[in-house]
Image (cartoon, coloured by chain):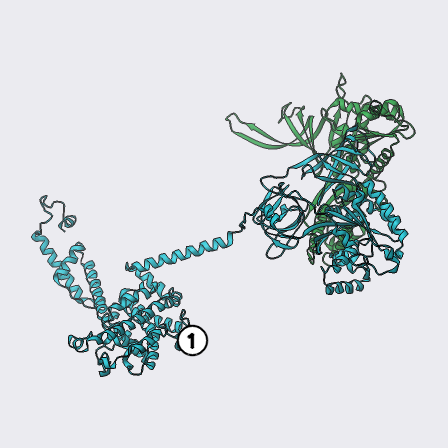
Chain colours: A cyan, B green
Amino acid sequence: MSRHRIKDVDYDDDDFYDDDDELADPEEQEFLQQCTTAVLQQLRAGQPSVTATKEEVQDALWHYYNDIDKSVNYLRGKREKEAAKLQKSKVQPVPAYPAPPSTAHFSAADFFRDCPWLNVPPHRKSEILIEPLYPRLGLLGGAPENGGKLSKLAALAAARKKKEGEKTPSLSDTSTPSTPKLEQPTSLDHSGTSSSLRDRLAASGRSSPKAPEGPGSLRRLATPSSSSHPIPKRPEAETKKPSVSEVSGSMQRMVLEAKEEPEPEQTVPTIRASPSTFASTIVGAATGPTAAEPSHLHSTSSDLLRIYGQDHAEPFDFAAPSPDDVVLNAQNTAKGMKSKSAASKSAVVKKGQSDLADGVKEFSVEDKVTVKSKNLDVISEYKKSTRKRSANFVVIGHVDAGKSTLMGRLLADQGAIDQRTLDRYRREAEKIGKGSFALAWVLDQGSEERARGVTIDIATNQFETDKTAFTIVDAPGHRDFVPNMIAGASQADFAVLVIDSSVGSFESGLKGQTKEHALLVRSMGVQKIVVAVNKMDTVQWDRERFEEIEQQISAFLTTAGFQDSNISFVPCSGVLGDNISRRTNDPHASWYTGRTLIEELETSEPYTHALEKPLRMTIGDVFRGGVQSPLSISGRIDAGSLQMGDHILIMPSGETATVRSLEVDSQPSDWAVAGQNVVLNIANIDPIHLRSGDVVCRPSSPIPTITSFTAKVLAFEHLMPMQVDVHRGRLHVPGRISKLVASLDKASGAAIKKRPKIVGPGVVVRVVVEMDQAVPLEAPTRIVLRAGGSTVAAGLLE
Amino acid sequence: MRCIKNKIEHNGSGAVTLCPEEPEDMWHAYNLIRPDDILRASAIRRVTTVQDTGSTSSARVHLNLVIRVKNLDFDPQSSQLHVSGQIINETPHTKVGQFHTLDLELNRNFTLEKEIGAGGEGVGWDSIAIESLKDAVDEGGNRRAEAVAVVMQEGLAHICFIGQFQTILKQKIEMSVPRKRQGGGDHDKGMNKFFKVTLETLIRQMEFNTSLTSGANNEAVRPVLLASPGFVASGFQKYIQAEASTTTPGLKRLLPSLVVVHSASGYTNSLSEVLQSPAVKRLLADTKYARETKLMDDFLEQLRKETNKATYGPREVEDAVEQGAVGRGGGVLIVSNRLFRSQDVAERKRWVALVDRVRDVEGGDVRILSSDHESGKRLEGLGGIAALLTFPVIEPDLDSDAE
């Protein structure tokens, strides 16, 4: 104490001025005396005159280093606080209600309530216990039966109550120091006026013995906002809230009462004093039930509190950051009265905000799609699967040979397309005067294709027979669209060559794309070819015509490299559907006893694909699959296997992507293997890196990109160093033959002539091809070289 | 290009002063100027001076510099020619021997001097140089015939400017157009977008004014060739017509000059096919390009016939000339002008001698093809030189390697 005073006094104070020396020098004593009187005078003179003891004043003076004004202020403040404390202590014993528990409510019936003869028989009590303990809130506004949530009305009522409870104290809090004295009556008045029968009942439920227990259980219920209220107000707010819950609680009890006729006052068990020794002696065993009953009610009420605690908290939480609260909180902080709970509350709020922020961040920034891979062993999975045998075939032939119509007929007959759609196509086709094209429209979906009656791009479609699932690739016949046909042929296991048998058309076709297509599919590795001699109805199923065509075509196909056993001929009519999936009824065609087209298709043997090799898939199309899959690519897997969640590399862009999901033959699947036509829905890549003709592979075994290659090709036309287009499936790039290395012997592959100047058709030659851009190509792969709109060579990359 | 002054001596040395007038003249200049020539042109040079105190100040000064050419850099897209070399004239700001890169500019004269050294180390104004000078100097002033070609296929378009001596690929447009699918309209949408972008690019590249008010100045619109396989080009034409009748009426001026032709693909390879089509032939009959293309086609035809009356490759052609097969009565020597652009003096001399021999001694025809044209590129593939012969020549290889 006196150590501090050293600061106050001069330095010339005695050196031996001891710490525990209580004696001040007389001069100082006198000064202190003067100050004290001055302070006392001021206190008395001040607006709310305050009294203070001399000791208090002196203490204050000492603390403020004899500053009179400060001391006065301090004492005033102290008085105010004490007054507030006083008021608080006054409030506490009267928690909610003006009616003291011991007065009006103390009826005789109540007093004798715990008497054994008035008691409820145990079996009836058990009924009560079986009854749902949770109050039916329906009375306050139709809350759901499960009791989980407060009804809107109840919540509103509760919120309003709470607000009213808050408002008065907050007003008083901000006003002058004199108001605290007024506060109590107002709040009492307020609760008095607002108290209804139910309130009264509720209050009756709250008795003096229970009161001390109240705050404890209420703490759970107290929302952060209420706990942050200034201290003087707190009991008030708290008592309000339980009363709300008690309202419904008491309602419940009233319901119970209605059932339990004999004891109308059962709802106020806690009011009872504990049984006197006398009573307990008389009643003896009867104390058990009585003790049980209050405990039961206790548990009910505590249950209620617990149940409501949560539910109340929710509506209150929304009310919590009201402007009042903000003001109050600010005041609290300014006064340094910020309670711990307030701090924790703000912390909670902050945490909530940061959680929210994190959530938002996750929500908006996150665009990486992660797909969980099932880590399947695709190959064993494939072996296990009991799929039907599948076969892809490409339909080729000269323009207007009736390829699309034939396939449309096939699909219609096999039920892959319903009659209604077909009828619609027929109607629409007739409308634009192209009635005969109706079947072709099944495959020619493009508006331009329909308008012009020409297939432009390949179309794929599926149908199933009993044994096999077929995928049709309908190729365009027009010479301008041979690149598209090459793309289609690269997806095929075998080919159906459609030939127009009508006079003149066959001959022109043979010179045209019939020949080119047949050569192309052969050079792309197709072994088996089914020749559908179409439009036989136009030549009255003339057997001679058929045999003439058969002879010419088989001669040509044999020279093209097809084995005789792999060539078959079917006379048919696409428009009429004869010999497609049913035999013709035409009497002129009775000479034909061979297989129908569909039977011929089913003779195709299963094809094996390089499942074990690294993944290779040429992208056939890049498109928007739908809302679920904004980016999809389609194509046929050339080699290897693929499953959902795989990371894939797109060459030549070198970008990676993730397979979100995939479809095999338009059916969702978890995996796919070589030979299947798939649609990959991919993510994590910009579509700008995807072009048709790009190759999908695995990052672990990427396909090399090259600008120059050597290839062994069969020349269809004269070859010299020239500009060519290089085709491989959908891939189509410009390049040039920079060198003719050597012409080769067809059988042995030995060089016949080195560096020929030019080679004629039919010669096998090794060439060096250079391209302007890097292209994903690797040996061995089949390539086609075209120039000036015709195929000049096809062969194998070395 | 205008010839301002011509002082070429008989021995092949001398100087010419030229004024380039249009971008293509830069290409001519590129073919005329060779390393070791002396070039005088105006230049802007940043001169840095160091004061005694060590402080430096730099200023840009206009100079007339004479340099001995070391290197040429030609940008065909923007038609800019940068010639770098060592300064040989003394100026207040530069020293002899300093390096400078001259940027030749349109409508600014430059003087090119070629000299024959005492030991004949220079080539001077040889016959090829004089011929290309003749080509360069546009006397009639009627050499404006040129066309714009849009070679396209689905999702790919090349916009090329076909000039007298060069074909410039101005812009390549590549877009991913979704293929047709079951019940999807994406394809049509994609094509429409592709047409839109192509048209916008074309208009920008042509510097075509689409506003109606500028229709008054009715400057002749160059023919625009739309070429594609299938229906893409006609679809594009329809699109332009639709645009002209709806949103941009200014396009109407463009419509008459559109020509739709067939091509095998959307790559520049197929330009030769475009130029062979009758419709285009009618339009561009007189252009050098058309003549060159025809010549190349004749040659390839001859080659295909395997009559041995056509040959290609440097050694083979020299052989044929040696035998006198490239002479009067149909002998044509076809040379790409790239051969004369060789940095190696001996190389150039070799080809000039060959050309001179065919023309002057053998009496054959000599055609120099621009390597910047499609036909020239085809010739490049054959080694840059080819010849149509008057009689079949047995190839030496065949003799030694006969079956």
Return the chain for callout 1. A
Instruction: Determine which quarter of the picture holds residue A39.
Output: bottom left
**Which one is in front, B92 or A143?**
A143
- The residue positioned farthest toward the right in the image shown: B329
Measuring 9% from the left and 56% from the top, which residue is drawn there?
A30
Q: Position of residue B392 (x, y in %)?
A: 89, 28
- The residue positioned farthest toward the front in the image shown: A593
Please rate how many residues cluster around mark 1, counting C-alpha atoms within 10 Å: few if below 14, some from 14 to 19, many from 20.
some
Q: Position of residue A257 (x, y in %)?
A: 32, 80
Q: Position of residue A294 (x, y in %)?
A: 26, 73
**In the depicted structure, whether residue B239 falls above or below residue A511:** below
- For the question of whether residue A92 can be seen, the reply is yes
> Label 1 belongs to which residue?
A142
Q: What quarter of the picture does the N terminus of chain B occupy? A: top right
- For the question of whether residue B221 can be seen, the reply is no
**In the depicted structure, whether residue B204 falls above or below residue A47:** above
Q: What quarter of the picture does the C terminus of chain B occupy? A: top right
Q: Secondary structure at mark 1?
A: loop
Instruction: Determine which quarter of the picture holds residue A105.
Output: bottom left
Looking at the image, residue A238 sits to the left or right of residue B204; the answer is left
